Image (cartoon, helix red, strand yellow):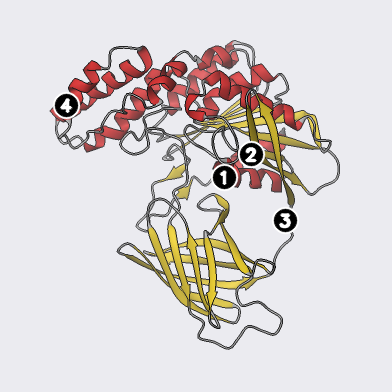
Amino acid sequence: MTQAASHRTTLNQGVRMRLPVAAVMLGCLCPAAAHGQDLIAGTWQGAWSRAGDSLPVTMIVRRDAAAGRYTATFDSDRLRVSGVPFREVSVEGCCAVTLVLQGDRTTTEFRGSVRGDSLTGVFREGSDDGRFAFHRAASAPSPYTEREITFRSGDATLAGTLLLPNVEGRVPAVVFLHGSGPEGRWANRFLATQAAAHGFASLIFDKRGVGSSTGDWRTATPDVLVGDAVAAVARLLDEPRIDPARIGIHGHSQGGTLAPMVAVRSRRVAFVVASAAAGLPTDSVERYSILNSVLPDAATAEDSASATRYAEAVVAAAYRGQPRLRVDSLAARYRDRPWFFPPPPPDNPYWTFSPAFAAYHPLEWWARVRVPVLLLYGGDDQRVPAAASASRIGATLRAAGNRRVTTRIFPGAGHTFRLPPGPSGWPVTAPDYIPTLLGWLARR
C-alpha cells in the first residue's frame, strides 16, 4: 500500500512484473514443416536455461490469415504471467523468425533454429548467456472462456475481462482489486487464470485511466478506488452463470489494504483475500517502505541517520501536511549521498494522493467485516510490515466477533511472495503460496 517503495524509480510500490524485451531470431536449418503444418504456428513448450537454472515457458503462436501476419503470447507459471503478448512476430524467407517481447528493463536476444517440431538455440541478456529449447505440443482446450466487459463507476467507464469456467451450473466468483500505480488487468491475470481453472469466475479490469478504462487513477482517492471495486462486484450480479451469494474479492498491497472498505460498502462480498494488506497507519507503512528502500545503500551510521531524517521529512510533508521546505532543504544537503532519491516534483500526484490515504484507517474498516478472511504475507516483505499488520488485523477481526480468519505468513518471501532469486535472476515463488490461496478458495 506504500507510495514510495521505489521513489528512485517509479514513486509507487505497485507490484508489476518486469518483463524482458526479447528479440528472437530463429534460423531454420532444416527441411520445411510437415505438409499442412505451419512453420511456427501452434503451442510450443520448453524452457530458457542459464546459470544452472531452468525456467519453464509455454509460447502460443497464431497466424492471422486475413492480416497475413503472426501473433504470439507466452505463459510462465514460475514468473506468474499468462498471455503476455509479443509486440511483433515476423517470418522472413523460408524460415527465419523474429519475435519481439516488449518489456521495460532489458533486451534479450534469442537465436536458434526450427527443426520440424523442435525449436532450439541460445540467447543473450546483457552480459548473460543462456540456451532455450522448445518442442511443438498439442493445444489443450482451455478450462475457461474469456469475455470482454465494461461497467460504469461514477464518471468512469471501466473495461475488463471476465473468465468463466467451462462447467455446468452457477459458479462462485472473484473480483481482483488493484495495487498502487497504473495497474492494468494484466497484473492479476495469472491468479485469475488459476482461479478460473479451479472453478471460480474471475473479473480483472483496468484501473481508471489505464488501458481501456477512462478516468484518472492519479487523482483517485481511496473512496473512488473502493467505488470502482464495488461497481465491479455489482457488475457480476448481472451474470446469470455467477452465484450472487458466492462473490468474493482478492486484493494485494493497496488492494488488500482497501479490501475491508470494499467488503463493507458492497454488502455482496462473501469472502475476502487480502495479501500484503497494511494493518498500521498509512504514514507508518510509508516510512517503513522508504527506509527499506534506501537504508541498504547507506554506507555509514551517519548515512543511516541522514537517510532516516530525510525519509521522515518526506512522509511528514506528504502524509501530515508539514511544509515541503524541509524536504527541499534536506534534499540539497544529501543529494550526493549513495542512498539519496530526489523528492517528487511539486506537481506530482504523490503530494495529493498521500493526504487522501493518510485519512484512511484500515482497522476501522476491518472491525466491520463479517465474512471469511484470508490474510497472506511474505515474511520478508520490505514494503508492508507483515507480522505487525497480520497481528493487528487478525486481532481487530476477532475482537469484533469474526472468528473466520486464516492467516499465513510465508518465511523468506517478499512483498510479492517471491523468494530471493538465484544466479539466474529468475524469481522463485514461495512453494505453498498458490496452493494455499487456491485451497482456501475451494473451501469457500
How packed is label 3: few (under 14 Cα within 10 Å), some, or many (20 or more)? few
Identify which amino acid the numbered label 2 is placed on: Ile
Asked if marks 2 and 1 touch (Cβ < 8 Å), the reply is yes
Callout 1 secondary element: helix
Disc nearer the start of the sequence (3/4): 3
Q: Taking 282 as reference, is 343 left or right?
A: left
Residue beneath label 3, please? 142
CA gap between label 3 and label 2 equals 18 Å
Q: In the image, what residue occupies the spot 28% across and 20% down?
A: 312
How packed is label 2: few (under 14 Cα within 10 Å), some, or many (20 or more)? many
CA gap between label 2 and label 1 equals 8 Å
Q: Which mark is residue 332?
A: 4
Residue beneath label 2, please? 204
Question: Can the viewer see residue 179?
Answer: yes
Q: Which mark is residue 186?
A: 1
Corner quadrant of residue 285: top left
Identify which amino acid the numbered label 3 is placed on: Ser
The C terminus sits in image quarter: top right
CA gap between label 1 and label 4 equals 39 Å
